[in-house]
Image (spheres, rainbow, N blue to C red):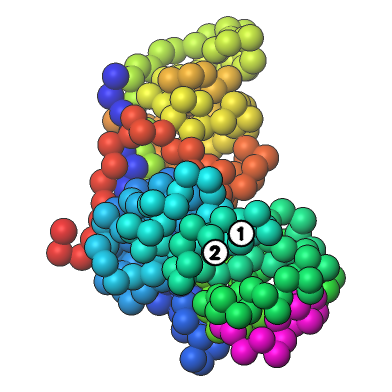
Amino acid sequence: MATGTLNIDLDAIAANWRALDRLSASGVQTAAVVKADAYGLGTTRVVRALAQAGARRFFVAAAEEGAAVRQALGPGPQISVLSGHMAGDTEMIHDLELTPMLNSLEQITRHLEALPGHPFGLQLDTGMNRLGLEPMEWEAVAPYILEADPELLMSHLACADEPDHPMNEAQLAVFEDMTGGTGLPRSFAATGGILLGPRYHFDLTRPGIGLYGGRPFETGNPVVSLSLPIIQTREVAPGETVGYSAAWEAEAPSVIATLAAGYADGLPRTLSNAAMLWDGATPCPLVGRVSMDMVTVDISHLPEIPRALDILGPHQSVDDLADAAGTIGYELLTVLGRRYTRRYLEHGA
């Protein structure tokens, strides 16, 4: 079956990193979060573009992802592992010079016993209740841990995409209380935290979604576009239905196009009867259910039958499509299917 074409603009990713680097306070290092296969867009090509733009530190979710970054970039750039030092990761952390961000007393013990002298950082829980040492744990072990010289103390904001949310100030106060006076480098801000302003920047910022053209970095460059080929068209009479569960019924004579993409390609079923596709600047409604490999679209109003329709592009961002699906841009980016033909756009490429 013919597949859609997913265009990934590496120049836009690099430009977004540079813009977020400029937004970070003077003297603050700007890292890049490339977990989940660089948010679904392909680790190797993305990290090389970011490194060329100036990024020297990368954050991944797991040691295996760190291995992919190291393979792409070679020695030099620092690669931090947000899941910390998991059981079975010791050899990989050592051999590939990964920096685990330790999350628990168990991980601290494992790392200091297995790899004494190997760089590490610490995650602190300032109220998100997900990863990191809680304030009482940190108070108890800080004197011992600080002797081992962690190279970074970090935490994560729960509500940074809502600038007026009281959690932001509350977490900032906790982070200041937990880390003030240590003299160690600190990191608190991802994309949303960068936009909250310099009080949240500390020594290192670590943008993620903003690199890939997503909210809350509204002024970022769009990174992805996705065009889906039309397999077949048919005329549907008034009263006839389209797709599973007869979920859409024609009210007038209609021309329905069947396109090659479905939920196996990262288009959630919640887009059924809810999304738009585009022929240039002309919107075309998705009608009926999203199935595993296909969607159906009403193109009755088009003067000619196109070869393909855009579901991501200049008239519909990944966040716009996520709004229609009732989810977030992060989720759609990370589940874009492997059946798409991936085309990387880069100056001179």
- Label 2: state its secondary structure: helix
Look at label 2 and name its amino acid: Leu
State the residue in front, 134 or 296: 134
* Residue tagged 1: 109
Residue that extends furthest to the front in the rendered view of this protein: 113
Q: Position of residue 113 (x, y in %)?
A: 53, 60
179 part of magenta stretch: yes
Query: Which residue appears at 34% of the width and 30% of the height?
Result: 339
State the residue in front, 89 or 170: 89
Q: Which residues are magenta?
A: 173-188
Q: Is residue 230 left or right of residue 213?
A: left
Look at label 1 and name its amino acid: Thr
Q: Position of residue 154 (x, y in %)?
A: 62, 71
- Label 1: state its secondary structure: helix
Q: For the C terminus, which image quadrant?
A: bottom left
Residue 170, visible in the rendered structure: yes
* Residue tagged 2: 112
